Structures are given as C-alpha cells and as structure tokens.
Amino acid sequence: MANISRYEPYEVSDPLDNLFRGFFRPVQMDKDMPQIRMDVKEDEKSYAVHADMPGVAKDDIHVTIDGNTVSISAEVKKASEQKDGEKLLRRERYFGRVSRSFALENEVDEATASARYQDGVLELVLPKKAAVSAKRLNVQ
C-alpha cells in the first residue's frame, strides 16, 4: 500500500522564499477573537446604539466620545479557578481586550449622552449636538 502524504501548497524550504510566504495569500483575521457586534439607529434628535458584550463586567466597559467618533472598549478577565486534579481539555472562551470605534454623521452632545449595561447588552443614547448657525458680524 502506498504512503499517503498531505500536500501543502505554501510549504517552502528555501529561507528566501519564506520571506514572501504569506504575501500573496489573503490575510485572515483571528477568528477566535470576539468582535463587538452592534446595531445603530437614528432619529431626528439622537442615535441609539445596542452593543452585544456578553461576559463583560460593567466596570470593565469604557465609552469615549470625541465629536462624532464613538469608541467602545472592554476587558474580559480570565477566571483563574482550577480545582485539584482537573485538567483543561478545551478552551473556547476569549479573555483579553476588545475595542471598536465608529463615526456618526452628526456630532454627539457628550453632556447629555447616557449609557446602560444590562444582560450583556450595552445601550447608548447619543443626542445630536444642535447645529450652530452662522453668526454675522457687523464691520465697524
């Protein structure tokens, strides 16, 4: 019976070719790293953002508003509980820092913006800043 071997199309033995190994292949993001998934809604006066952030403590969520740019970041901490005689067979939960930034069409009024976190969902209410009308100066 013949030996079966796995064909690796990108396996290169020359060190110079290794330099360009991933250059022509599409770059893939780490699939294990979670993303902050969100819905953004708009009405005449404000934006409403609902972001899924399961497993995050309320104190570990940070929201920053800078003009029309909103940044959400969170840190998921690792529980270091392990009993005697146990061994970990598989770990699929992510521990670390995640963040996401996005720009809105209008600037946000930071003074009246509010955030609420309940059942793994962060809810932001971001009122739009009133449009500043142009002021005409009289030349004297």
Image: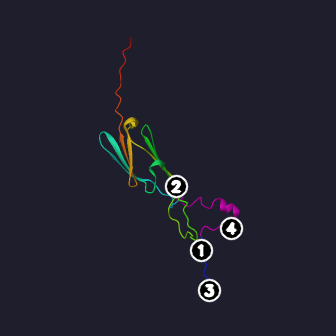
Which label was assigned to residue 77? 2
Which residue sits at x=54%, y=62%? 81
Q: Is residue 77 above or below residue 46?
A: below
Label 1 is placed on what type of residue?
Tyr
For marks 2 and 1, the one nearer the N-term is 1
Q: Which residues are magenta?
A: 9-29
Real-space Cα separation, disc 3 to disc 2, in angstroms: 50 Å
Real-space Cα separation, disc 2 to disc 1, in angstroms: 40 Å
Q: Position of residue 105 (x, y in %)?
A: 38, 41
Label 4 is placed on what type of residue?
Ser
For marks 2 and 4, the one nearer the N-term is 4
Query: Mark 1 = which residue?
Result: 7
Q: Residues within 10 Å of mark 4 (few under 14, many from 20)?
A: few
Which residue sits at x=68%, y=67%? 13
Between disc 2 and disc 4, the foreground one is 2
Q: Which residue, as the protein is rendered here, is positioned at the far left?
A: 44
Query: Mark 4 = which residue?
Result: 13
Which label was assigned to residue 2? 3
